[in-house]
Amino acid sequence: MVAASILAHALLSSQIRNIDAIQNIKVTINTGEDDLRADSGIMVIMQYTGGRHQVSPVKRPDEAFASNSTKTITITPSESGLKLPDLEHIQIDFHSGNGTGYDDHWSLQGVTVTATVNGQEVIVYNNRNLGMKLMYSQRWTSPIFPGAKAEDTIDPADFWAEIEGGDPAPSNTSLVLDLETTDGRFWVGRRSGSQIADPRYPGARVEARTSDKLSVNSIRAVRIGFGQSAMSSTDSGDRGGNWTMRGVRLCYKDSSGNRKEFASYNEINFRFGDGGWWQSPIYRRFDRHAGNPLGLLRVEVLTGKDDLRRLNWANGASNHYDSKVDITFGIPAFSSLARYGNWLIDPKNPMHEKTHTQPIIEQDGDEFPEGWTGHYGSWGRFSKDFITRDTPYFLTSDLQNVILKFKQGQGGNVSPTQSNGGGVFGDFLAADQWDLQGIIISYQAPDRSIRRIFSDFEVNQRMSSNDQSWKSRNFETLLLRRF
């Protein structure tokens, strides 16, 4: 439904002009399996750009809100001349009644915001699959609307996650915030010393720190890593133990230094099992542009709970115990032929048979293990830089998708010479199995920075057979792709 909201905004220019004033705003709320008691309250807070807001009640003080039901309220803007880009986001403020002697719980299933301009209704925000549980007295904050001008420019050091835990996060484990923007830039921040000061729901604060500046409108996705998954490809990490993230609020300081909520996720109760990643919905697409010439491609692979079996034998002998991954990038024929058709159809050129069914990359060495570096254990991350061919040059926007193929280590007996006298290891007798957690595809931009063109931290696919593959969706940066 987030994608539907993005698409709705993409159609605005054909329906109305952004300079026209809003006549009214309709907010439709869908409740889930848990109803709202009559003594509980709900307020809608429409947040406008520039720190302005408007508060409207959703129900009468003695009115109940049944489960699996819908209610729509109509808001007349409190100020004249309000326009579509002035709508920043919506908040639902829930206040629990205690007339029964117990606090109320309520399921917020969906929210739709529609603005009327020149007699036409335009969907500004639409998510009918929230599945958000609100308990006691909590506030839910939507992401910034796709059409909001939201001119706040922040230092990523002023963007952080306030995490509520079902139990205290062990102090010796890693918590990381991965912040990604629509131009492919990313920042990784670590857990600060700050703790959430709520004795009922202990938590932690995680910040993304750098000296760069960015617009809050350019934030594409936020990920939170725990334990080993939070470490870099060169760190072994700390297992940390299982931990439940009860909820998370993403916050930033605006240009005036005020704390503002970017989005909130209440009562998600996400379970980290010795590591792993939680990722937000995708707020905005990667920027579309003609692309940059590819000189270097970086592939980062995230492992889940079950590691990728890798053994570095002292004698350097090849063996069939190790597992590997093969990477193939798809190139759409229309994109390639349009720019260098003559080169591709010339049978003298080595890529004649490799236009879009085989890898377009050259591995930059066969050092152990095949050029990949990093940590292969549970919740690990390993990566490799690939060098593309010089002629013809490909653009970042030519890449269509990526396919990862699991080359399964078949197992067998380990001889004493291969294991430095260690004898037979039972774990190596059976064929390997592996959990693919996620994958990140980046390139080196002309300014030498590394920028992403695809990322998914929650693939979560079990690899249990040789040549089993996972294929990504088409990259958003694909040249000439139609939406």
Image (cartoon, helix red, strand yellow):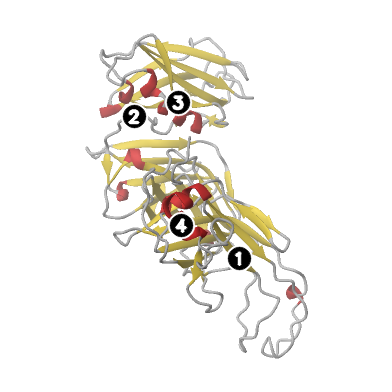
Q: Earlier in the sequence, mark 4 or mark 1?
A: 1
Task: Check contact, mark 3 vs mark 4: CB within 8 A.
Answer: no
**Residue identifier under label 4:** 342
Determine whether the residue tagged by mark 3 lies in a helix, strand or loop: helix
**How far apart are the two marked residues, 3 and 1, measured between alpha carbons?**
39 Å
Label drawn at residue 148: 2
Label 4 is placed on what type of residue? Answer: Asn
**Residue identifier under label 3:** 8
Q: Position of residue 230 (x, y in %)?
A: 48, 59
In terms of depth relative to the viewer, which is nearer, 339 or 226?
A: 339
Q: Which of labels 2 and 3 is toward the front?
A: 3
Q: Which of labels 4 and 2 is toward the front?
A: 4
Determine whether the residue tagged by mark 2 lies in a helix, strand or loop: loop
**How far apart are the two marked residues, 3 and 4, measured between alpha carbons?**
41 Å
Task: Check contact, mark 3 vs mark 1: CB within 8 A.
Answer: no
Q: Earlier in the sequence, mark 4 or mark 2?
A: 2
